[in-house]
Amino acid sequence: MNGCENMINELKIEIKKALEAFFKQNYDLEINIVVEEPKKAEMGDISIPSFSVVKALRRPLPECANIIKDEVVKFDYVLDANVMGGFVNLTINKSYVSSCILKQILDEKENYAGSEKNGKNIVIDYSSPNIAKPFSIGHLRSTIIGHSLKLIYLKAGYNVIGINHLGDWGSQFGKVIVAYKKWGSEESVKEDSLSELAKLYVRFHQEAKEDPSLDDEAREVFMKLEQGNEEYLKLWQWFRAESVKEAMNLYEMLDVSFDSYNGEAFFNDKMDGVVKELEEKNLLVLDDGASIVKLDDDMPPALIKRRDGASLYITRDLAAVFYRKKTYSFDKCLYVVGNEQKLHFNQLKKVIEKMGYDYGEQIYHINFGFVLRNGKKMSTRDGGVTTLKDVLNEAIKAAYNQINIKNPSLEDKENIAKNIGVGAVIFNDLKNHRSLDYEFNIDQMLKFEGQTGPYIQYTGVRINSILRENKIDGKINYDVFLKQHYFDVVKLLDQFKDMINRAINENAPSVICKYLLSIAQEFNVFYAKEKILTDDLETRNANLLLITAVKIVLEEGLRLVGIKSLERM
Ligand code: ARG
Protein backbone atom coordinates (compact mmCIF):
# COMPACT_ATOMS: atom_id res chain seq x y z
CA MET A 1 0.00 0.00 0.00
CA ASN A 2 1.26 3.46 -0.91
CA GLY A 3 0.55 5.04 2.47
CA CYS A 4 -3.18 5.53 2.68
CA GLU A 5 -3.78 6.20 -0.96
CA ASN A 6 -6.70 4.39 -2.55
CA MET A 7 -6.88 2.75 0.85
CA ILE A 8 -10.35 1.24 0.86
CA ASN A 9 -9.91 -0.25 -2.56
CA GLU A 10 -6.51 -1.67 -1.65
CA LEU A 11 -7.97 -3.10 1.51
CA LYS A 12 -10.60 -4.89 -0.56
CA ILE A 13 -7.93 -6.25 -2.85
CA GLU A 14 -5.85 -7.44 0.11
CA ILE A 15 -8.82 -9.18 1.69
CA LYS A 16 -9.62 -10.90 -1.58
CA LYS A 17 -6.03 -12.08 -2.02
CA ALA A 18 -5.73 -13.24 1.56
CA LEU A 19 -8.95 -15.26 1.41
CA GLU A 20 -8.04 -16.82 -1.91
CA ALA A 21 -4.62 -17.77 -0.51
CA PHE A 22 -6.28 -19.14 2.63
CA PHE A 23 -8.55 -21.50 0.68
CA LYS A 24 -5.69 -22.56 -1.53
CA GLN A 25 -3.47 -23.35 1.41
CA ASN A 26 -5.99 -25.02 3.68
CA TYR A 27 -8.35 -26.70 1.23
CA ASP A 28 -6.31 -26.74 -1.96
CA LEU A 29 -9.14 -24.92 -3.74
CA GLU A 30 -8.96 -22.07 -6.28
CA ILE A 31 -11.94 -19.95 -5.36
CA ASN A 32 -12.75 -16.56 -6.83
CA ILE A 33 -13.65 -14.39 -3.86
CA VAL A 34 -15.75 -11.32 -4.58
CA VAL A 35 -15.29 -8.30 -2.31
CA GLU A 36 -17.87 -5.58 -2.87
CA GLU A 37 -19.77 -2.63 -1.46
CA PRO A 38 -22.87 -3.67 0.48
CA LYS A 39 -26.17 -2.63 -1.06
CA LYS A 40 -26.96 -0.44 1.93
CA ALA A 41 -24.53 1.48 4.09
CA GLU A 42 -26.22 0.23 7.30
CA MET A 43 -25.05 -3.26 6.46
CA GLY A 44 -21.40 -2.37 6.72
CA ASP A 45 -18.53 -0.99 4.67
CA ILE A 46 -17.44 -4.07 2.77
CA SER A 47 -19.40 -7.19 1.88
CA ILE A 48 -18.28 -10.67 0.85
CA PRO A 49 -20.78 -13.09 -0.67
CA SER A 50 -20.02 -16.64 0.47
CA PHE A 51 -21.77 -18.55 -2.32
CA SER A 52 -18.66 -19.35 -4.32
CA VAL A 53 -17.12 -20.84 -1.17
CA VAL A 54 -20.24 -22.91 -0.44
CA LYS A 55 -20.12 -24.33 -3.92
CA ALA A 56 -16.43 -25.18 -3.84
CA LEU A 57 -16.28 -26.48 -0.27
CA ARG A 58 -19.61 -28.33 -0.37
CA ARG A 59 -20.37 -27.35 3.22
CA PRO A 60 -23.41 -25.56 4.65
CA LEU A 61 -23.62 -21.83 4.15
CA PRO A 62 -23.36 -20.74 7.81
CA GLU A 63 -20.20 -22.77 8.20
CA CYS A 64 -18.59 -21.24 5.12
CA ALA A 65 -19.60 -17.71 6.10
CA ASN A 66 -18.06 -18.24 9.52
CA ILE A 67 -14.79 -19.45 8.04
CA ILE A 68 -14.64 -16.21 6.01
CA LYS A 69 -15.57 -14.17 9.04
CA ASP A 70 -12.84 -15.64 11.20
CA GLU A 71 -10.26 -14.86 8.53
CA VAL A 72 -11.26 -11.26 7.80
CA VAL A 73 -11.41 -10.09 11.40
CA LYS A 74 -7.66 -10.69 11.48
CA PHE A 75 -7.19 -7.57 9.36
CA ASP A 76 -6.01 -4.49 11.21
CA TYR A 77 -8.65 -2.11 9.92
CA VAL A 78 -11.57 -4.52 10.22
CA LEU A 79 -13.42 -3.85 13.46
CA ASP A 80 -16.20 -6.32 13.14
CA ALA A 81 -17.80 -8.84 10.80
CA ASN A 82 -21.40 -10.09 10.69
CA VAL A 83 -22.96 -12.89 8.78
CA MET A 84 -26.20 -11.80 7.14
CA GLY A 85 -27.93 -14.09 4.69
CA GLY A 86 -25.20 -15.39 2.47
CA PHE A 87 -22.99 -12.37 3.02
CA VAL A 88 -20.24 -11.53 5.43
CA ASN A 89 -20.48 -7.80 6.12
CA LEU A 90 -17.48 -5.99 7.54
CA THR A 91 -17.29 -2.81 9.47
CA ILE A 92 -13.98 -1.07 9.06
CA ASN A 93 -12.34 1.31 11.46
CA LYS A 94 -13.76 4.45 9.87
CA SER A 95 -12.04 6.90 12.14
CA TYR A 96 -8.62 5.36 11.67
CA VAL A 97 -9.06 4.91 7.92
CA SER A 98 -10.39 8.48 7.55
CA SER A 99 -7.57 10.00 9.53
CA CYS A 100 -5.03 8.12 7.45
CA ILE A 101 -6.58 9.13 4.11
CA LEU A 102 -7.16 12.75 5.04
CA LYS A 103 -3.70 13.24 6.51
CA GLN A 104 -2.17 11.90 3.34
CA ILE A 105 -4.20 14.31 1.21
CA LEU A 106 -3.15 17.26 3.37
CA ASP A 107 0.47 16.15 3.30
CA GLU A 108 0.69 15.63 -0.42
CA LYS A 109 -1.63 18.45 -1.47
CA GLU A 110 -1.85 18.80 -5.26
CA ASN A 111 0.47 15.81 -5.67
CA TYR A 112 -2.08 13.52 -4.04
CA ALA A 113 -3.02 10.59 -6.28
CA GLY A 114 -0.12 11.33 -8.60
CA SER A 115 2.43 8.77 -9.69
CA GLU A 116 6.17 8.55 -10.10
CA LYS A 117 7.51 8.83 -13.66
CA ASN A 118 6.97 5.51 -15.41
CA GLY A 119 9.19 6.13 -18.43
CA LYS A 120 6.40 5.60 -20.96
CA ASN A 121 5.86 8.02 -23.83
CA ILE A 122 2.44 9.13 -24.97
CA VAL A 123 1.99 11.18 -28.12
CA ILE A 124 -1.29 13.10 -28.24
CA ASP A 125 -2.31 14.66 -31.55
CA TYR A 126 -5.02 17.23 -30.81
CA SER A 127 -6.61 20.48 -31.91
CA SER A 128 -4.95 20.27 -35.36
CA PRO A 129 -7.08 22.91 -37.12
CA ASN A 130 -7.04 23.38 -40.86
CA ILE A 131 -5.45 26.64 -41.75
CA ALA A 132 -7.39 28.59 -44.34
CA LYS A 133 -10.54 26.72 -43.41
CA PRO A 134 -12.81 27.68 -40.53
CA PHE A 135 -11.61 26.69 -37.04
CA SER A 136 -14.57 24.49 -36.30
CA ILE A 137 -16.29 23.65 -33.06
CA GLY A 138 -14.97 20.14 -33.65
CA HIS A 139 -11.47 21.52 -33.30
CA LEU A 140 -12.53 23.12 -30.04
CA ARG A 141 -13.62 19.68 -28.81
CA SER A 142 -10.36 18.15 -29.92
CA THR A 143 -8.43 20.91 -28.14
CA ILE A 144 -10.33 20.53 -24.88
CA ILE A 145 -10.32 16.71 -24.81
CA GLY A 146 -6.69 16.39 -25.90
CA HIS A 147 -5.47 18.95 -23.41
CA SER A 148 -7.24 17.21 -20.54
CA LEU A 149 -5.86 13.82 -21.57
CA LYS A 150 -2.41 15.35 -21.60
CA LEU A 151 -2.80 16.58 -18.02
CA ILE A 152 -4.25 13.26 -16.83
CA TYR A 153 -1.44 11.21 -18.38
CA LEU A 154 1.15 13.57 -16.91
CA LYS A 155 -0.40 13.15 -13.48
CA ALA A 156 -0.18 9.39 -13.84
CA GLY A 157 3.56 9.58 -14.49
CA TYR A 158 3.70 9.37 -18.28
CA ASN A 159 5.88 11.50 -20.47
CA VAL A 160 3.51 13.33 -22.82
CA ILE A 161 4.23 14.95 -26.18
CA GLY A 162 1.39 17.19 -27.33
CA ILE A 163 1.30 17.69 -31.07
CA ASN A 164 -0.74 20.19 -33.04
CA HIS A 165 -0.80 18.47 -36.42
CA LEU A 166 -1.78 21.64 -38.25
CA GLY A 167 -3.72 21.17 -41.45
CA ASP A 168 -1.34 23.54 -43.18
CA TRP A 169 -1.14 21.84 -46.56
CA GLY A 170 -3.67 20.63 -49.05
CA SER A 171 -5.88 21.66 -51.91
CA GLN A 172 -7.70 24.26 -49.82
CA PHE A 173 -4.67 26.50 -50.26
CA GLY A 174 -5.23 26.57 -53.99
CA LYS A 175 -8.77 27.77 -53.34
CA VAL A 176 -7.83 30.38 -50.79
CA ILE A 177 -5.00 31.77 -52.91
CA VAL A 178 -7.32 32.14 -55.89
CA ALA A 179 -9.99 33.73 -53.69
CA TYR A 180 -7.50 36.06 -52.05
CA LYS A 181 -6.16 37.26 -55.36
CA LYS A 182 -9.65 37.92 -56.65
CA TRP A 183 -11.48 39.29 -53.62
CA GLY A 184 -9.14 39.63 -50.66
CA SER A 185 -7.00 42.36 -49.18
CA GLU A 186 -3.88 42.41 -47.07
CA GLU A 187 -5.45 44.56 -44.37
CA SER A 188 -8.41 42.34 -43.71
CA VAL A 189 -6.27 39.22 -43.48
CA LYS A 190 -3.99 40.97 -41.00
CA GLU A 191 -6.91 42.14 -38.95
CA ASP A 192 -8.70 38.87 -38.40
CA SER A 193 -6.90 36.21 -40.36
CA LEU A 194 -8.76 33.07 -39.33
CA SER A 195 -12.19 34.37 -40.07
CA GLU A 196 -11.04 36.36 -43.10
CA LEU A 197 -9.43 33.31 -44.68
CA ALA A 198 -12.46 31.28 -43.74
CA LYS A 199 -14.69 33.85 -45.43
CA LEU A 200 -12.58 33.70 -48.56
CA TYR A 201 -12.81 29.93 -48.50
CA VAL A 202 -16.58 30.04 -48.14
CA ARG A 203 -16.91 32.64 -50.89
CA PHE A 204 -14.79 30.50 -53.17
CA HIS A 205 -17.21 27.61 -52.74
CA GLN A 206 -20.23 29.79 -53.40
CA GLU A 207 -18.74 31.30 -56.54
CA ALA A 208 -17.44 27.97 -57.80
CA LYS A 209 -20.99 26.66 -57.81
CA GLU A 210 -21.77 29.22 -60.51
CA ASP A 211 -18.40 29.08 -62.21
CA PRO A 212 -16.75 25.63 -62.11
CA SER A 213 -13.66 26.92 -63.92
CA LEU A 214 -12.60 28.36 -60.56
CA ASP A 215 -12.02 24.80 -59.36
CA ASP A 216 -9.60 24.15 -62.21
CA GLU A 217 -7.83 27.37 -61.44
CA ALA A 218 -7.45 26.39 -57.80
CA ARG A 219 -6.15 22.95 -58.68
CA GLU A 220 -3.58 24.50 -60.92
CA VAL A 221 -2.50 26.96 -58.26
CA PHE A 222 -2.11 24.20 -55.70
CA MET A 223 -0.07 22.11 -58.12
CA LYS A 224 2.24 25.08 -58.66
CA LEU A 225 2.45 25.57 -54.93
CA GLU A 226 3.50 21.95 -54.51
CA GLN A 227 6.13 22.50 -57.16
CA GLY A 228 7.51 25.44 -55.24
CA ASN A 229 6.10 28.50 -57.02
CA GLU A 230 7.58 31.42 -55.14
CA GLU A 231 4.66 33.80 -55.16
CA TYR A 232 2.29 31.12 -53.91
CA LEU A 233 4.74 29.84 -51.32
CA LYS A 234 5.07 33.33 -49.92
CA LEU A 235 1.31 33.70 -49.68
CA TRP A 236 1.06 30.27 -48.07
CA GLN A 237 3.68 31.14 -45.50
CA TRP A 238 1.94 34.37 -44.69
CA PHE A 239 -1.51 32.75 -44.37
CA ARG A 240 -0.02 30.10 -42.13
CA ALA A 241 1.78 32.55 -39.87
CA GLU A 242 -1.27 34.80 -39.51
CA SER A 243 -3.53 31.84 -38.80
CA VAL A 244 -1.20 30.37 -36.20
CA LYS A 245 -1.05 33.75 -34.51
CA GLU A 246 -4.85 33.79 -34.35
CA ALA A 247 -5.11 30.24 -33.11
CA MET A 248 -2.63 31.16 -30.39
CA ASN A 249 -5.11 33.69 -29.03
CA LEU A 250 -7.63 30.94 -28.64
CA TYR A 251 -5.09 28.64 -27.02
CA GLU A 252 -4.21 31.41 -24.64
CA MET A 253 -7.85 31.82 -23.65
CA LEU A 254 -8.03 28.11 -22.95
CA ASP A 255 -4.53 28.00 -21.44
CA VAL A 256 -3.51 25.23 -23.81
CA SER A 257 -0.06 24.68 -25.28
CA PHE A 258 1.73 22.16 -27.49
CA ASP A 259 5.17 20.66 -27.69
CA SER A 260 5.17 20.58 -31.47
CA TYR A 261 3.37 22.40 -34.27
CA ASN A 262 4.67 20.10 -36.99
CA GLY A 263 1.68 19.89 -39.25
CA GLU A 264 1.02 18.33 -42.60
CA ALA A 265 3.44 20.57 -44.53
CA PHE A 266 6.29 19.34 -42.33
CA PHE A 267 5.86 15.93 -43.93
CA ASN A 268 5.98 17.11 -47.54
CA ASP A 269 9.56 15.94 -47.95
CA LYS A 270 9.03 12.78 -45.94
CA MET A 271 6.43 11.07 -48.07
CA ASP A 272 8.62 9.76 -50.85
CA GLY A 273 10.22 7.36 -48.42
CA VAL A 274 6.81 6.00 -47.46
CA VAL A 275 5.75 5.55 -51.07
CA LYS A 276 9.03 3.80 -51.83
CA GLU A 277 8.66 1.47 -48.89
CA LEU A 278 5.10 0.61 -49.92
CA GLU A 279 6.40 -0.18 -53.42
CA GLU A 280 9.21 -2.34 -52.10
CA LYS A 281 6.80 -4.27 -49.96
CA ASN A 282 4.59 -4.82 -53.01
CA LEU A 283 1.65 -3.11 -51.39
CA LEU A 284 1.13 -0.31 -53.91
CA VAL A 285 -1.30 -1.01 -56.72
CA LEU A 286 -2.13 1.21 -59.69
CA ASP A 287 -5.80 1.92 -60.00
CA ASP A 288 -6.93 4.11 -62.86
CA GLY A 289 -3.67 6.05 -62.65
CA ALA A 290 -3.80 6.49 -58.88
CA SER A 291 -1.73 4.53 -56.37
CA ILE A 292 -3.65 2.66 -53.71
CA VAL A 293 -3.11 0.07 -51.00
CA LYS A 294 -5.77 -2.62 -50.93
CA LEU A 295 -7.04 -3.40 -47.46
CA ASP A 296 -9.47 -5.99 -46.15
CA ASP A 297 -12.64 -6.79 -48.01
CA ASP A 298 -14.74 -4.76 -45.65
CA MET A 299 -12.53 -1.68 -45.91
CA PRO A 300 -12.11 0.59 -48.93
CA PRO A 301 -8.52 0.87 -50.20
CA ALA A 302 -6.23 3.64 -48.97
CA LEU A 303 -5.56 6.24 -51.66
CA ILE A 304 -1.86 7.10 -51.41
CA LYS A 305 -1.26 9.17 -54.52
CA ARG A 306 -3.72 10.85 -56.83
CA ARG A 307 -3.52 10.54 -60.60
CA ASP A 308 -1.89 13.95 -60.85
CA GLY A 309 0.76 12.81 -58.36
CA ALA A 310 -0.64 14.86 -55.48
CA SER A 311 -0.24 13.29 -52.06
CA LEU A 312 -3.11 12.83 -49.68
CA TYR A 313 -4.06 13.23 -46.05
CA ILE A 314 -3.36 9.59 -45.28
CA THR A 315 0.03 9.70 -47.02
CA ARG A 316 1.05 12.51 -44.72
CA ASP A 317 -0.34 10.68 -41.71
CA LEU A 318 1.73 7.62 -42.60
CA ALA A 319 4.87 9.72 -42.82
CA ALA A 320 3.87 11.37 -39.53
CA VAL A 321 3.35 8.13 -37.62
CA PHE A 322 6.75 6.75 -38.66
CA TYR A 323 8.39 10.02 -37.76
CA ARG A 324 6.70 9.99 -34.35
CA LYS A 325 7.69 6.43 -33.62
CA LYS A 326 11.29 7.23 -34.48
CA THR A 327 11.43 10.58 -32.72
CA TYR A 328 9.42 9.89 -29.57
CA SER A 329 9.37 6.06 -29.40
CA PHE A 330 5.79 6.25 -28.24
CA ASP A 331 4.02 3.59 -26.22
CA LYS A 332 0.72 5.03 -27.32
CA CYS A 333 -0.14 7.52 -30.05
CA LEU A 334 -3.55 9.13 -29.56
CA TYR A 335 -5.43 11.02 -32.27
CA VAL A 336 -8.18 13.21 -30.86
CA VAL A 337 -10.39 13.56 -33.92
CA GLY A 338 -14.15 13.42 -34.58
CA ASN A 339 -16.19 10.27 -35.16
CA GLU A 340 -16.36 11.07 -38.87
CA GLN A 341 -12.71 10.10 -39.38
CA LYS A 342 -13.15 6.60 -38.05
CA LEU A 343 -12.46 5.02 -41.42
CA HIS A 344 -9.34 7.10 -41.94
CA PHE A 345 -7.74 5.86 -38.72
CA ASN A 346 -8.80 2.27 -39.32
CA GLN A 347 -7.13 2.49 -42.71
CA LEU A 348 -4.04 4.05 -41.23
CA LYS A 349 -3.69 1.23 -38.71
CA LYS A 350 -4.32 -1.40 -41.35
CA VAL A 351 -1.68 -0.01 -43.72
CA ILE A 352 0.85 0.06 -40.90
CA GLU A 353 0.05 -3.56 -40.08
CA LYS A 354 0.34 -4.58 -43.72
CA MET A 355 3.74 -2.97 -43.84
CA GLY A 356 4.77 -5.40 -41.14
CA TYR A 357 4.96 -3.07 -38.14
CA ASP A 358 3.71 -4.38 -34.83
CA TYR A 359 2.54 -1.14 -33.29
CA GLY A 360 -0.86 -0.76 -34.93
CA GLU A 361 -2.28 -1.50 -31.51
CA GLN A 362 -0.53 1.46 -29.97
CA ILE A 363 -2.52 3.78 -32.20
CA TYR A 364 -5.81 5.02 -30.82
CA HIS A 365 -8.46 7.09 -32.51
CA ILE A 366 -9.87 9.10 -29.62
CA ASN A 367 -13.13 9.82 -31.34
CA PHE A 368 -15.78 12.35 -30.36
CA GLY A 369 -19.30 13.39 -31.34
CA PHE A 370 -20.86 16.54 -32.73
CA VAL A 371 -21.80 19.71 -30.94
CA LEU A 372 -25.44 20.55 -31.50
CA ARG A 373 -27.30 23.80 -31.17
CA ASN A 374 -31.05 23.41 -30.91
CA GLY A 375 -30.62 19.81 -31.93
CA LYS A 376 -28.79 20.60 -35.16
CA LYS A 377 -25.10 20.21 -35.92
CA MET A 378 -23.27 23.42 -35.09
CA SER A 379 -21.07 24.25 -38.00
CA THR A 380 -18.99 27.03 -39.41
CA ARG A 381 -18.94 25.66 -42.92
CA ASP A 382 -21.77 27.66 -44.44
CA GLY A 383 -20.32 30.98 -43.47
CA GLY A 384 -22.43 31.11 -40.32
CA VAL A 385 -20.91 33.50 -37.82
CA THR A 386 -20.30 31.13 -34.90
CA THR A 387 -16.55 31.39 -34.76
CA LEU A 388 -14.91 29.81 -31.80
CA LYS A 389 -13.86 33.10 -30.38
CA ASP A 390 -17.47 34.26 -30.57
CA VAL A 391 -18.62 31.19 -28.72
CA LEU A 392 -16.13 31.62 -25.89
CA ASN A 393 -16.79 35.33 -25.68
CA GLU A 394 -20.52 34.71 -25.54
CA ALA A 395 -20.01 32.43 -22.52
CA ILE A 396 -17.69 34.92 -20.84
CA LYS A 397 -20.15 37.75 -21.34
CA ALA A 398 -22.99 35.72 -19.91
CA ALA A 399 -20.84 34.88 -16.88
CA TYR A 400 -20.05 38.56 -16.47
CA ASN A 401 -23.73 39.48 -16.51
CA GLN A 402 -24.40 36.83 -13.91
CA ILE A 403 -21.72 38.20 -11.61
CA ASN A 404 -23.20 41.67 -12.00
CA ILE A 405 -26.50 40.37 -10.72
CA LYS A 406 -25.22 38.08 -7.96
CA ASN A 407 -22.11 39.81 -6.70
CA PRO A 408 -21.67 43.21 -8.34
CA SER A 409 -18.95 44.46 -6.01
CA LEU A 410 -16.64 41.50 -6.72
CA GLU A 411 -13.06 42.50 -7.45
CA ASP A 412 -11.35 41.43 -10.67
CA LYS A 413 -14.70 40.67 -12.28
CA GLU A 414 -13.36 40.39 -15.81
CA ASN A 415 -10.83 37.74 -15.03
CA ILE A 416 -13.27 35.75 -12.93
CA ALA A 417 -15.90 35.94 -15.66
CA LYS A 418 -13.36 34.62 -18.12
CA ASN A 419 -12.57 31.65 -15.91
CA ILE A 420 -16.23 30.90 -15.27
CA GLY A 421 -17.25 31.26 -18.91
CA VAL A 422 -14.40 29.22 -20.33
CA GLY A 423 -14.73 26.67 -17.53
CA ALA A 424 -18.45 26.30 -18.27
CA VAL A 425 -17.78 25.56 -21.94
CA ILE A 426 -15.07 23.04 -21.06
CA PHE A 427 -17.08 21.24 -18.38
CA ASN A 428 -20.14 21.06 -20.60
CA ASP A 429 -18.00 19.41 -23.21
CA LEU A 430 -16.12 16.98 -21.00
CA LYS A 431 -18.86 15.80 -18.67
CA ASN A 432 -20.40 13.50 -21.29
CA HIS A 433 -18.52 10.60 -22.75
CA ARG A 434 -16.60 12.03 -25.67
CA SER A 435 -18.14 9.70 -28.25
CA LEU A 436 -21.58 11.31 -27.74
CA ASP A 437 -23.07 14.39 -29.37
CA TYR A 438 -24.03 17.16 -26.99
CA GLU A 439 -26.11 20.29 -26.94
CA PHE A 440 -24.49 23.69 -26.71
CA ASN A 441 -26.67 25.86 -24.51
CA ILE A 442 -24.96 28.80 -22.84
CA ASP A 443 -27.69 29.45 -20.24
CA GLN A 444 -27.73 25.81 -19.21
CA MET A 445 -23.98 25.39 -18.90
CA LEU A 446 -23.64 28.54 -16.78
CA LYS A 447 -26.13 27.52 -14.10
CA PHE A 448 -24.76 27.43 -10.57
CA GLU A 449 -26.76 24.32 -9.78
CA GLY A 450 -26.82 21.10 -11.74
CA GLN A 451 -24.09 19.39 -13.66
CA THR A 452 -22.05 22.44 -14.56
CA GLY A 453 -18.56 23.86 -14.28
CA PRO A 454 -19.73 26.86 -12.23
CA TYR A 455 -21.37 24.45 -9.77
CA ILE A 456 -18.04 22.76 -9.11
CA GLN A 457 -16.19 26.07 -8.98
CA TYR A 458 -18.80 27.42 -6.59
CA THR A 459 -18.39 24.45 -4.26
CA GLY A 460 -14.69 25.30 -4.07
CA VAL A 461 -15.46 28.96 -3.45
CA ARG A 462 -17.71 28.04 -0.53
CA ILE A 463 -14.91 26.06 1.03
CA ASN A 464 -12.36 28.78 0.37
CA SER A 465 -14.48 31.38 2.07
CA ILE A 466 -14.52 29.26 5.24
CA LEU A 467 -10.83 28.42 5.11
CA ARG A 468 -9.73 32.02 4.62
CA GLU A 469 -10.70 32.85 8.18
CA ASN A 470 -10.40 29.51 9.92
CA LYS A 471 -7.50 27.12 10.41
CA ILE A 472 -7.20 23.74 12.07
CA ASP A 473 -5.97 24.44 15.56
CA GLY A 474 -5.40 21.69 18.09
CA LYS A 475 -6.83 18.22 18.47
CA ILE A 476 -9.06 16.56 15.92
CA ASN A 477 -12.05 14.43 16.81
CA TYR A 478 -11.78 11.53 14.37
CA ASP A 479 -14.88 9.87 15.78
CA VAL A 480 -17.05 12.12 13.63
CA PHE A 481 -16.02 9.96 10.69
CA LEU A 482 -18.13 7.17 12.12
CA LYS A 483 -21.08 9.16 10.82
CA GLN A 484 -22.04 8.04 7.36
CA HIS A 485 -22.28 11.46 5.70
CA TYR A 486 -18.74 12.20 6.85
CA PHE A 487 -17.40 8.87 5.77
CA ASP A 488 -19.13 9.05 2.38
CA VAL A 489 -17.09 12.13 1.53
CA VAL A 490 -13.85 10.47 2.66
CA LYS A 491 -14.62 7.36 0.63
CA LEU A 492 -15.00 9.46 -2.49
CA LEU A 493 -11.76 11.36 -1.93
CA ASP A 494 -10.05 8.03 -1.51
CA GLN A 495 -11.07 7.06 -5.05
CA PHE A 496 -9.13 9.81 -6.81
CA LYS A 497 -6.28 7.65 -8.03
CA ASP A 498 -8.64 4.95 -9.15
CA MET A 499 -10.54 7.54 -11.20
CA ILE A 500 -7.35 8.77 -12.83
CA ASN A 501 -6.52 5.22 -13.86
CA ARG A 502 -10.00 4.71 -15.18
CA ALA A 503 -9.84 7.95 -17.18
CA ILE A 504 -6.61 6.67 -18.73
CA ASN A 505 -7.96 3.22 -19.53
CA GLU A 506 -10.92 4.75 -21.33
CA ASN A 507 -9.07 7.84 -22.55
CA ALA A 508 -12.06 9.68 -21.19
CA PRO A 509 -11.85 12.93 -19.21
CA SER A 510 -15.58 12.49 -18.51
CA VAL A 511 -14.58 10.07 -15.76
CA ILE A 512 -12.94 12.95 -13.88
CA CYS A 513 -15.88 15.30 -14.50
CA LYS A 514 -18.38 12.77 -13.16
CA TYR A 515 -16.13 12.21 -10.17
CA LEU A 516 -15.99 15.95 -9.47
CA LEU A 517 -19.77 16.11 -9.63
CA SER A 518 -20.07 13.29 -7.06
CA ILE A 519 -17.68 15.02 -4.71
CA ALA A 520 -19.50 18.33 -5.02
CA GLN A 521 -22.84 16.63 -4.47
CA GLU A 522 -21.64 14.61 -1.48
CA PHE A 523 -19.95 17.67 0.00
CA ASN A 524 -23.11 19.70 -0.36
CA VAL A 525 -25.12 17.01 1.43
CA PHE A 526 -22.57 17.15 4.22
CA TYR A 527 -22.62 20.93 4.25
CA ALA A 528 -26.39 21.02 4.59
CA LYS A 529 -26.27 18.65 7.57
CA GLU A 530 -23.33 19.94 9.55
CA LYS A 531 -22.40 23.29 10.91
CA ILE A 532 -18.74 23.44 9.92
CA LEU A 533 -17.73 26.07 12.45
CA THR A 534 -19.35 24.37 15.38
CA ASP A 535 -18.47 25.36 18.96
CA ASP A 536 -16.93 22.00 19.77
CA LEU A 537 -13.33 22.69 18.80
CA GLU A 538 -12.24 19.14 18.10
CA THR A 539 -15.22 18.53 15.84
CA ARG A 540 -14.65 21.86 14.16
CA ASN A 541 -11.07 20.80 13.46
CA ALA A 542 -12.29 17.54 11.96
CA ASN A 543 -14.68 19.50 9.75
CA LEU A 544 -11.92 21.83 8.63
CA LEU A 545 -9.69 18.86 7.90
CA LEU A 546 -12.37 17.27 5.77
CA ILE A 547 -13.20 20.38 3.76
CA THR A 548 -9.53 21.16 3.21
CA ALA A 549 -9.12 17.70 1.72
CA VAL A 550 -12.22 18.23 -0.44
CA LYS A 551 -10.74 21.52 -1.65
CA ILE A 552 -7.45 19.86 -2.59
CA VAL A 553 -9.07 17.07 -4.58
CA LEU A 554 -11.64 19.34 -6.23
CA GLU A 555 -9.02 21.85 -7.34
CA GLU A 556 -6.67 19.19 -8.61
CA GLY A 557 -9.52 17.46 -10.42
CA LEU A 558 -10.56 20.73 -12.04
CA ARG A 559 -6.98 21.33 -13.11
CA LEU A 560 -6.94 17.92 -14.80
CA VAL A 561 -9.84 18.91 -17.01
CA GLY A 562 -8.35 22.30 -17.79
CA ILE A 563 -10.59 24.44 -15.57
CA LYS A 564 -9.43 27.14 -13.17
CA SER A 565 -10.39 27.09 -9.51
CA LEU A 566 -11.52 30.35 -7.96
CA GLU A 567 -11.05 32.02 -4.62
CA ARG A 568 -14.24 34.08 -5.02
CA MET A 569 -17.04 34.34 -7.54
N1 ARG B 1 -6.70 18.70 -39.63
C1 ARG B 1 -7.53 17.55 -39.53
C2 ARG B 1 -8.99 17.94 -39.62
O1 ARG B 1 -9.36 18.98 -39.19
C3 ARG B 1 -7.33 16.81 -38.25
C4 ARG B 1 -5.96 16.23 -38.11
C5 ARG B 1 -5.90 15.18 -37.08
N2 ARG B 1 -4.61 14.61 -36.98
C6 ARG B 1 -4.07 13.74 -37.85
N3 ARG B 1 -2.85 13.35 -37.65
N4 ARG B 1 -4.77 13.29 -38.86
O2 ARG B 1 -9.81 17.18 -40.11
Image (cartoon, helix red, strand yellow):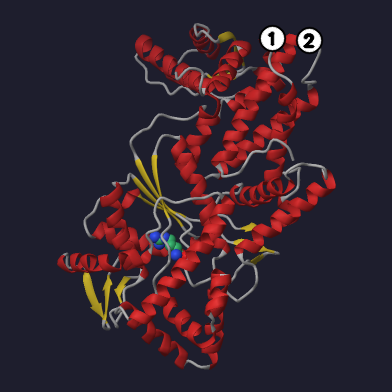
The front one of 50 and 200 is 200
Q: Residue at x 32, y 70 (%)?
A: 301
The front one of 373 and 154 is 154
For the C terminus, the image quarter is top right
In the rendered structure, the answer to whether residue 286 lies left or right of residue 17 reads left
The image quadrant where one finds ligand 1 is: bottom left
In the rendered structure, the answer to whether residue 558 lies left or right of residue 356 reads right
Cα distance between the residues tagged 2 and 1: 9 Å
Q: Amino acid at mark 2?
A: Asp
Q: Quadrant of residue 57?
A: top left
In the rendered structure, the answer to whether residue 235 lies left or right of residue 106 reads left
Rendered view: 269 above or below 141: below
For label 1, the residue is: 477
Residue 151 horizontal/vertical position (percent): 49, 42
For label 2, the residue is: 536
Evaluate if marks 2 and 1 touch, with contact meaning CB atoms under 8 Å apart: yes
Q: Amino acid at mark 1?
A: Asn
The front one of 227 and 242 is 242
Q: Earlier in the sequence, mark 2 or mark 1?
A: 1
Element type where label 1 sits in the image: loop
Rendered view: 45 above or below 316: above
Residue 444 horizontal/vertical position (percent): 74, 52
